Image (cartoon, grey):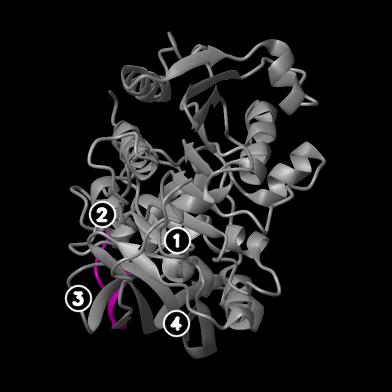
Amino acid sequence: MTNKYVSFSLITLMISSSLMGASLQRKNEKKLYIGSNSTEAKLSYSGILQHEGTRAPSLTIMKQLAESQIEHTIGPMSSSQYTAVPKGDHIISNVKLISKNANVYTIGYDYNGTVVLENGPKTTYDIILALNPEKIYSAGMVGDINPCTDSHYQSEGDFWYFWNPSNPGCKLKKDIDYKIVKAKVARFENTTKTYPEYHNLPDAKGNINIHVLFGMDDNSKGRNPLNSGDINAENYRDFRTYLLGKGYVAKKWTAAEVSKIAKTLDGEKPFVETISKGNIIYRFFFAPSAIDEDSLGFHWFYKDALENSSIMIYGGHSGLGGHLDLDSIEQNLGETINFNKNKYQIYFFDSCTSYKYYNRMYFDRKVSEKDPKGTKKLDIFTNGLSTYFHVMPDSNKAIAIAIEKALGYAQNGEFVSYQTLAKQIDSNNLFGVNGDEDNEAPKKIK
């Protein structure tokens, strides 16, 4: 097993945090959270940055520079003594030019936003700010290598996510290349005893449909997960073997069956199986899922999972948010994804930093007049930090056991709470659940 994360590709999707903040203001309601060893918190601080130029930057440029500096906080936060990750709902204000020294302009701003923060700090949290976000990458170079970032992800496009001035060999200096500011912390309490709405998972036929989509790590490897050398094929086989050992039966889809879902697919077909026992029906999918790869088959099956599944589990790269970006997927399909606002569902984005990328975007698609937050019919599982492929099987099995207990298939049948699931699934990656605050109490599944 290699040491690869579940999140990255060559593309970077940069979402405007200021627009996300405006959307948060419109909603004006707090979505609660569950974490095994973390809580959500409101973070606020006064930022300071530098810009070199022959003329004073405009307000628009200063805001863009502030957003870039904020983006660069993610790398140090993910490797701090107490890890954290921003939600991306922040608002910046009071952006202003503070001073000029030769051709160096100093800019200030105020930051307010939500983060998931590991248990520990209660009132303050140290934030590392790249003083000049435009030059921080080049400032860290030593020859052709940048020791301040990940040895594998060396590009400037990935630097904001991986950099850490404490890395061995990193020559970046405090108060010259970066500054440490003390942010104010106001923690929110986690929900304490909530459950999936197990009784609302079955469809009209009484079936619980669980779609598990395995995105390939390396699309040059074999497309048959039963013998492919791809990292995520190992996870496919592991979970498949586990289910078969529990009495499930597997049936591979024919090309004609695949084509009914992937209506416009003209390339290699994905590998799809139904693995079922009684009223629990898994659909396993294996193919490339990156937005810049041969992922049309994935997009069709992902659309179907979002629209029709009881539980959707995506395991694969997040592509810095790009791979599961709904607008991009709909553009590729030429069709709208029709979220069922009357159907209760659970989505698990088992990829790197999915907390930042896949919260608001998906809840917004479930919003209705009766559900202004989009949480009544949707619960979302996310990871706050980089997540390794090898932890996926344990997460999938924890969910499988919870469903079997709720249906009485497992001995000592009981309802497994979200708080218990969070402890079972968390792999020191700030796993959490959003959307459970308005869930109904569990009932026996008929």
Element type at mark 2: helix
Taking the image as drawn, is residue 30 in sight? yes
For the residues labelled 1 and 2, the Cα–Cα distance comes to 45 Å
Q: Quadrant of residue 126?
A: bottom left
Dot in front, 1 or 2: 2
Q: Are marks 3 and 1 in contact (CB under 8 Å)?
A: no
Give, as a three-letter code, the residue at label 2.
Answer: Thr
For the residues labelled 3 and 1, the Cα–Cα distance comes to 31 Å
Up-down: is 214 above or below 335?
Answer: above
Give, as a three-letter code, the residue at label 4.
Answer: Asn
Q: Are marks 3 and 4 in contact (CB under 8 Å)?
A: no
Give, as a three-letter code, the residue at label 1.
Answer: Lys
| Disc marking residue 420 | 2
Residue 317 on image: x %, y %: 47, 38
Up-down: is 21 above or below 285?
Answer: below
Label 4 sits on residue: 112
Magenta-span inclusion, residue 177: yes
Label 3 sits on residue: 121
Q: Which residue does the image show at 22% across and 51% down from the upper left?
A: 167
The magenta segment: 171-185
Q: Earlier in the sequence, mark 3 or mark 1?
A: 3
Magenta-span inclusion, residue 32: no
For the residues labelled 2 and 3, the Cα–Cα distance comes to 24 Å
Label 1 sits on residue: 135
Element type at mark 3: loop
From the viewer's perspective, tell me whether residue 375 is left or right of residue 444: right
